[in-house]
Image (cartoon, rainbow, N blue to C red):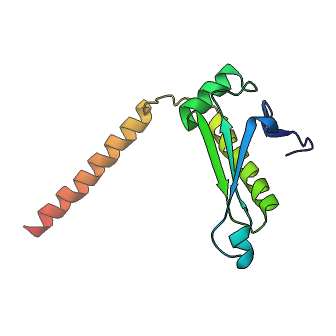
């Protein structure tokens, strides 16, 4: 969260109000001793892409195609729920930003006439070397 405490800034053109995110907390596995058995430190954040009013039509379609109608991120790395919440928000931001990147389409290219000629010359020269070797063995 950059400056604003009530929005998640994904990139320059996309911000999501935190009110659109659903949170679930549960008991986390791993270290923590007795504390881990009682505290709900595992944080799960869910973002409903299909129903989000803060996304543009193009952004929504791109996210639906790449991530599906719902994005779910889990963080259970830390013993603290606050740190796991921050981790979950960072991971959500990274996933959304990666999915929103517009990939430039690949333009098929052909080898130039000179490149084609050089390749054929190299093949011819290699064949000549092998032909010369064959004559030596006889």
Residue at the spot 70% in from the left edge and 28% down from the top edge: 52
Image coordinates for residue 82, horizontal then vertical, percent: 82, 59
Residue at the spot 90% in from the left edge and 43% down from the top edge: 5
Tally of numbered discs: 0
Query: Which of the image's four quarters has the C terminus?
Result: bottom left
Closer to the camera, 13 or 33?
A: 33
Residue at the spot 72% in from the left edge and 69% down from the top edge: 38
Image coordinates for residue 97, horizontal then vertical, percent: 69, 40
Q: Is residue 71 above or below residue 110?
A: below
Residue 31: which quarter of the image? bottom right
Judge left or right: residue 8 versus residue 94: right
Residue 70: which quarter of the image? top right
Image coordinates for residue 62, horizontal then vertical, percent: 60, 29
Residue 7: which quarter of the image? top right
Residue at the spot 54% in from the left edge and 29% down from the top edge: 105
Hey, which residue is sitting farthest right in the picture? 3
Hey, which residue is sitting farthest front in the picture? 38
Image coordinates for residue 85, horizontal then vertical, percent: 77, 54
Q: Is residue 84 above or below residue 125?
A: below
Hey, which residue is sitting farthest top in the picture? 57
Closer to the camera, 104 or 92?
A: 92
Q: Is residue 118 visible?
A: yes
Q: Is residue 104 visible?
A: no
Closer to the camera, 9 or 75?
A: 75
Hey, which residue is sitting farthest left in the picture? 138
């Amino acid at each position: 969260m950059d400056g604003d405490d009530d929005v998640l800034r994904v990139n320059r053109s996309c911000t999501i109000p935190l009110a659109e995110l659903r949170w679930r907390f549960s008991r986390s596995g791993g270290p923590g001793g007795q504390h881990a058995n009682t505290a709900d430190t595992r944080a799960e954040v869910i973002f409903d892409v299909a129903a989000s009013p803060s996304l543009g039509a193009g952004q929504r379609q791109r996210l639906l195609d790449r991530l599906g109608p719902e994005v779910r991120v889990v963080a259970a790395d830390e013993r603290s729920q606050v740190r796991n919440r921050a981790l979950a928000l960072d991971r959500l931001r990274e996933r959304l930003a990666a999915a929103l990147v517009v990939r430039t389409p690949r333009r098929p290219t052909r080898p130039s006439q000179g490149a084609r000629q050089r390749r054929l010359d190299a093949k011819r020269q290699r064949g000549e070397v092998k032909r010369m070797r064959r004559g030596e063995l006889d």
